[in-house]
Image (cartoon, rainbow, N blue to C red):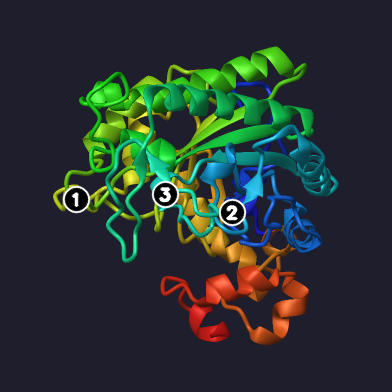
């Protein structure tokens, strides 16, 4: 192995006490391949098994905490009869030596009535997303919001009972936790909205509920992470200053990490062109001394990963590149980084163990260049 990559292979211990063997995690990416009832398919087990070996941890595709919070092909952590299915996935990942982290979410207004069997999607307020064919969601009542908070706690319990090493609360990528924090999707005038401070109440309540479940049900250290999207392009929308204030609250919640979801690890602010530093670096400087940060976004080469660590960020998550090259970490360790694949050749489909639904999904995504151009 090239000694300049040694830091990637240093062990890391989270605040909870869980230790991973190196600084590289698999980023959560939907496979769109679960059964309609949210049970995990054999194709998905093969997909994770193909990629998990040698990583510090795998963060899975998102699992809904309530059945009205799913999209087509998402995992389910919404009932106890899914614990067995989740347990098999945890075991698949852990059989490689990697830790298994289950990502928990609710789709909110990004859902569709067709996927929800005719049920109207729900959100903080009855405001549709700014995307083509977006449906207008039904605003949740205060009692329903409390029920949703409890659902995140119950899903955390199920993850513990299924044998996972941790959970990641999905507060990013326009899903429900983010919808409550966003001034675009949250127009409420009650405890759950109306001011920036009140828009923080839902994400903070979810964190508290998950912490309570861990304290009650886990008999060993258990990872609790939080994923965040630092900005929105909508007006009104989440600004970097809003996010800094939320992070200032989150850093004191005994979380194990903050996972900063950006398309490019090096990107600066989308909203304030006067900010030149990468957002991840700004967040590291603000709270990195209090809570570990995971950097993600267009990390393809080991040099890209090292660039993140050189910003002071202790952990990196690899997403798209692990779809393209399941042996990414193995090749670096063996000094074969020059053979790392950076685009998908259709003839590699069998070796890559990409489920058919996921293959179709990624080939249709305009942002997956050069992947989309290679497999379309």
Sequence order check: which comes first, mark 1 or mark 2?
Answer: 2
Query: Which residue: 77% across, 58% down?
Result: 41
Cα–Cα span, label 1 and label 2:
35 Å
Query: Which residue: 25% across, 30% down?
Result: 188
Q: Which mark is residue 271?
A: 1
Q: Which mark is residue 173?
A: 3
* Left or right of 326 on screen, residue 114: left
* Left or right of 239 on screen, residue 341: right
Q: Answer few, some or many: residues within 10 Å of disc 2's Cα (few below 14, many 20 plus, some between 14 and 19).
A: few
Where does the image place residue 72, in percent across and percent down from the top left? 58, 59
**Which of 331/214 is in front?**
214
Q: Is residue 144 visible?
A: yes
Marks 1, 2: nearer the viewer: 1
Where does the image place residue 146, in percent across and percent down from the top left? 46, 22
**Which of 18/212 is in front?**
212
The quadrant the N terminus occupies is bottom right
Q: Is residue 8 visible?
A: no
Marks 3, 1: nearer the viewer: 3
SS assignment at label 3: loop
Quadrant in the picture for residue 230: top left
Sequence order check: which comes first, mark 3 or mark 2?
Answer: 2
């Amino acid at each position: 192995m090239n000694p300049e990559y040694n830091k990637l292979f240093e062990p890391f211990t989270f605040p909870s006490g869980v230790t991973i063997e190196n600084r590289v995690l698999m980023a959560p990416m939907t496979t769109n391949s679960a059964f309609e009832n949210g049970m995990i398919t054999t194709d998905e087990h093969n997909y994770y098994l193909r990629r998990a070996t040698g990583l510090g941890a795998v963060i899975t595709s998102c699992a809904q905490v309530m059945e009205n919070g799913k999209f087509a092909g998402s995992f389910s952590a919404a009932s106890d009869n899914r614990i067995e299915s989740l347990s098999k996935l945890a075991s698949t990942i852990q059989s490689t030596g990697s830790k298994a982290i289950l990502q928990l979410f609710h789709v909110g207004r990004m859902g569709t009535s067709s996927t929800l069997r005719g049920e109207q999607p729900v959100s903080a307020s009855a405001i549709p997303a700014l995307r083509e064919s977006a449906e207008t969601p039904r605003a949740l009542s205060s009692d329903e919001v409390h029920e949703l908070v409890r659902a995140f706690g119950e899903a955390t319990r199920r993850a513990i009972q299924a044998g996972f090493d941790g959970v990641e609360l999905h507060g990013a990528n326009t899903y429900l936790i983010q919808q409550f924090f966003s001034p675009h999707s949250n127009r409420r005038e009650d405890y759950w909205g109306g001011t920036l401070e009140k828009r923080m109440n839902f994400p903070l309540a979810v964190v508290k509920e998950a912490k309570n479940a861990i304290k009650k049900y886990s008999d060993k250290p258990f990872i609790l992470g939080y994923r965040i999207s630092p900005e929105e392009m909508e007006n009104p929308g989440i600004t970097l200053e809003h996010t800094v204030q939320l992070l200032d609250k989150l850093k004191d919640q005994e979380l194990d990490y903050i996972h900063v979801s950006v398309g490019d690890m090096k990107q600066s602010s989308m909203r304030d062109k006067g900010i030149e530093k990468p957002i991840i670096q700004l967040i590291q400087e603000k709270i990195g001394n209090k809570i570990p940060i995971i950097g993600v976004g267009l990390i393809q080469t080991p040099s890209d990963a090292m660039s993140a660590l050189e910003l002071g960020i202790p952990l990196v998550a690899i997403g798209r590149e692990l779809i393209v090259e399941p042996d990414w970490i193995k090749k670096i360790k063996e000094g074969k980084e020059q053979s790392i694949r950076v685009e998908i050749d259709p003839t590699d489909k069998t070796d890559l163990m990409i489920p058919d639904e996921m293959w179709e999904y990624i080939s249709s995504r305009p942002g997956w260049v050069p992947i989309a151009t290679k497999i379309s």
